[in-house]
Amino acid sequence: MVVASEPESYLPSPAASHTTAANDSSSSSTTAAGLPPQRTSPHPYHPHLRHVSLRRSTRTRSSSLGYRTAVFTTKPTQLERVILLLHNNPFIPPNSIREEVEWFYESLGIDDTYFALQDEEIIARHVLALWSAKIGAYVNSERELDVHLKQEDEDGAVFIHSTVPGHQVPPSPTATVTSFSTAGPSAVGAGGAASRSDTPHGHYERTIEDKYLDSPPADHIYRLESYRSQAHIEHPLRSYFVTRCHFPTPSSDASSSTDAFNIRAVSDIGFLEKVSESALARYSRIVRQVVERKGIVVEQHLGSGGSGGGEVRLYLGFQRLSAKGFFTTLTDLYHYYGLTSTRKYVEQFSNGATVVCVHLTNFPQSEDKAEREGKVQWILTQLTRDASLLYCLPSTPLQHLFSGQLLSVQESVYAYTGWIFAQHFLNRLGTEYATLQRLLTKGGEEDGAVAGVLAKLKKRLREVTYTRQEVLDVITAYPELIRSCYKMFERVHGVNASNRRAPSPSPYANEEYDAAGIMEKIESVVANEHEVAVFQAFVTFNQAVLKTNFYQPTKVALSFRLDSAWLPEIEYPMPLYGMFLIIGSEFRGFHLRFRDVARGGIRIVQSRNRESYSINLRSLFDENYALASTQQKKNKDIPEGGSKGTILLDYGVGAIPRVAFEKYVDAMLDLLIPGQTPGIKEPIVDLLGKEEILFFGPDEGTAEFMDWASLHARHRGAGFWKAFTTGKGAGMGGIPHDTYGMTTRSIHQYVLGIYRKLGLEEGMVRKIQTGGPDGDLGSNEVKISGDRTVAIADGNGVLYDPQGIDRGELMRLAGERKACGAFDVKKLGKGGFRVLVDETKVTLPDGSVVENGFKFRNEFHLDKLAQAELFVPCGGRPESVNLTNVHRLLDEDGVPRWKYVVEGANLFFTQEARLFLEKKGVVIFKDASANKGGVTSSSLEVLAALALNDDEFAQHMQVKGDVVPPFYEKYVEEVQTIIERNARAEFECIWREHDRLKIPRSILTDQISIAIVKLNEEIQQNPVLWDDIPLRRLVLSEALPKLLLEQLGLDTILKRVPDNYVRAIFGSWLASRFVYEFGHESGQFAFLQFMLGYFGKLGQE
């Protein structure tokens, strides 16, 4: 095979010798290669490239195809100019030029779009490229000519290449069509077919997608037209025409203006010139749906052949850049069902919509009309269903199992999901670890050093047992076991709205499997225990899934509500109430909660490099669990329990945090809101059997997205939309934590408590903080405190002044929310310095040299310069101080460099490190106690959203411009008062219990939290107190904000707020007030004494 590609420049022609040989009448009748003798034709004879005249003068595409083609009236003139150019550069024999050019223009079936787009010079070069390739094929006795032509510039590109249309044999439906069985994988397509990405066809599509559709240059948007030639040649040509879009309405205006749904205002000008009116109406409808809702929009339009096997147009609309790799994967999809495409279009719109249109042919034929129509309809149903899955996960490491015909789309996506699940849960520790832990535990209490060693061992065991690649290799080696596991999954969840089994292309569609049967099959097939464990993870996953959007017609990511009972208690001692797994094309995530009514932030985790991604991936679930556990302890005196969500962005795929967050939220809503729209959101199998409401809050990387999430929940029809997210902007009725310093107010109460108990003067205390004046906690800590801050480490670097950093300059940065890189270094005192993260080899005033600013910033809290009375971490990664580095916080005499620590940042210290420092005499208040101000604010924000109806909420809680409603202003003040009251109450309890029992404060925080949470649950579950209506009303009148009671009255609040939420308020108030007053070890008599105070108020005995 000889490839014809565009030459860099004109090369010397072999024309002379070739012409002589061609005209030699004494030549033998055949050549050594078996080719017929050369004829007077200007091109060598090739059986695959017969010279056939199309005999057309003008050419107009039928409007039934959806596009108009203006007659290219100058095409004959252009042809003559190309001939002239080639005569001026006579590399082709002069007597052969015309026929060669006419053959190029008329016989190859190249679409007229090519000739309209290209100038004569480019066309002449392409003609020459083909001529050179044919000569090469003749010389090398090749019988195929593989055409590859391309032209690229800033405004677009042209690609033309030879192609062999797919002729895979599709599955055959049964007589009823509702169920589908096959003889095996080879029946679906031409068994063992190569992946599309391995073919030249796939190479060009991948190039176009990567360069022009998925990752275009800034401010460039491209549309695509692709045609397969209809010429009578063995290997027809596939042409791709990429052109830069030009919109009447700029992209920056269209998505939010009144033109968002005006199809003529948001369409490319070239598209408007070509599209027919009927097709434009269809595009308009699809684009509107794309803009109005998340997920893919799929429509089918039957051509003249109708459902009897003629051409079908498949339209697929989605948000631009929301499914990278989808266009090329779509080719795999229709090839899987034995279809080919004659045309493909990718249309872009300035409001952010993308619509792919594929003209499909080669549907199964049958003399029986009903049978033929049934086959076609089945394939179209499967295409629609599979497209929604591929939109969620267009490219995975298991893609080859689908494109190679070994698994169906559903099975390959399921396999990827199982692979994700196995990565996080396969490496469990087992009974040996539990035995070791018991042996190393003394008297039921864990020594800090022992705990640290066990924690390191735990991490090491999980890292080395099963790697991701090893698990992937096992999955790939046994596709038949994947099919079996998938059947177990599908038989439970693959049921549509009418309770009928969804049709499946699986060859095991009629077989039934339970867990025992599948495990028996697994053990009989695989080679060793490691491989058994991999597939055991798939079975565990199947058993854990309570509901999923896997079979929803439209979705943006896959979501699974899981039963967590299978999690080992030795590793996760506090049982979860709810567990969600979400998988998108550029991320994976979890959401964990410890109570039915729970709230916590959603955190985005990004990775600097591949190594950090591997670390983040391995620790994702455990870190999520730890954060939710901390939240549970932190939420001790509010109605919501603890929860937390994490979104890990894939590394190296250009993941956009907002896009990932939106997919995460929408996929979660699929499981919270019952589907009621056929073909869009349908009812799903719900093994949980009860309504769930989740409350999300801001965390790292998501603070700016809370408004959108709330509005999207309203758009999806969620009645809880106002309360769905906290941390919203004031215009949405939110109470921004950073604006009002909610979290810092709680932290500072602990600082003030230390000063008060120890008789310290704030202005004389030296302080170090991580997290700078550009962040929420960091900026508000600067604003609220009056100490001598000597060092700050933030995202920019390290700022240090042993005399105390200039307070006025810090206040300026905090007011402007700027990091230490903006600090005026002229205001640093003697011995002061600033080292930025991108600096190297910086000499400090003491003569020491900082080799790497990034490392210096990351470890500054461990540096000998980080010496002060008070340390307040307001930012930093979890476990920044742990048992392996805590010794670096001691000076040469073994004395800690800090006396007091108030942990503002979550999980900055490990528990082992806290206990180590407490033994050294450091006063530590851990995160679960100190930084609960934000969660208290969010809880009261949720309460207002639940209690006020939409009109009242808009009037009293939504700030409009600079106009702050009086109710809002007063409510914020009451929230601040409640935060400070709760923080003082817990501080006093911890201080008192430590003095009485000598238990480390870090442990007391947990014990107090556990005591409150346990008592809260007992109160809620015991009907005696709750059913006492006068007591209930009295307690709620104390627990609810006074302003809300004055505005609505207790009865209205009770009618509007869900009963389980009101119960949680009742229980948390009584439990927290009792423990704070009487201590965490107080028994029933103390609780009775506590309750007598309430009964006395009611006149009850």
Image (cartoon, rainbow, N blue to C red):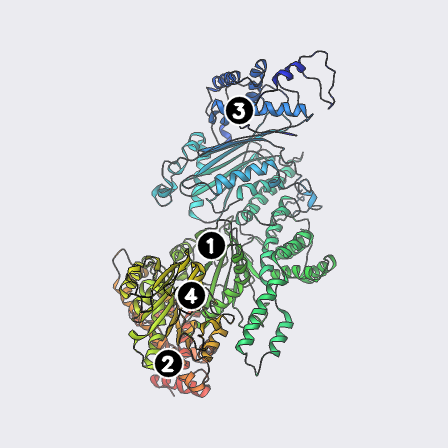
Q: Which mark is residue 988?
A: 2
Distance CA(mark 1)–CA(mark 2): 43 Å
Q: Amino acid at mark 2?
A: Glu
Q: Earlier in the sequence, mark 3 or mark 4?
A: 3
Distance CA(mark 1)–CA(mark 4): 40 Å
Front disc: 1 or 4: 4
Q: Amino acid at mark 3?
A: Arg
Q: Earlier in the sequence, mark 1 or mark 3?
A: 3
Q: Is residue 729 visible?
A: yes
Distance CA(mark 1)–CA(mark 3): 51 Å
Determine the residue positioned at 46% across, 19% down.
Answer: 74
Q: Which mark is residue 125?
A: 3
Distance CA(mark 2)–CA(mark 3): 85 Å
Locate residue 130, reporting x and y percent: 58, 24
Locate residue 793, reporting x and y percent: 39, 63
Residue 11 found in image quarter:
top right
Q: Is residue 818 above or below residue 1065?
A: above
Q: Earlier in the sequence, mark 1 or mark 2?
A: 1
Q: Amino acid at mark 1?
A: Asp
Q: Earlier in the sequence, mark 2 or mark 4?
A: 4
Q: Nearer the viewer, residue 789 or 68?
A: 789
Q: Is residue 814 above or below residue 116?
A: below
Q: Amino acid at mark 4?
A: Phe
Distance CA(mark 2)–CA(mark 4): 32 Å
Instruction: Name the residue beneath numbered marker 1.
Output: 666
Instruction: Name the residue beneath numbered marker 4.
Output: 860
Cβ atoms at labels 1 and 4 below 8 Å apart:
no
Q: Is residue 282 visible?
A: no
Tell me the SS state at disc 2: helix
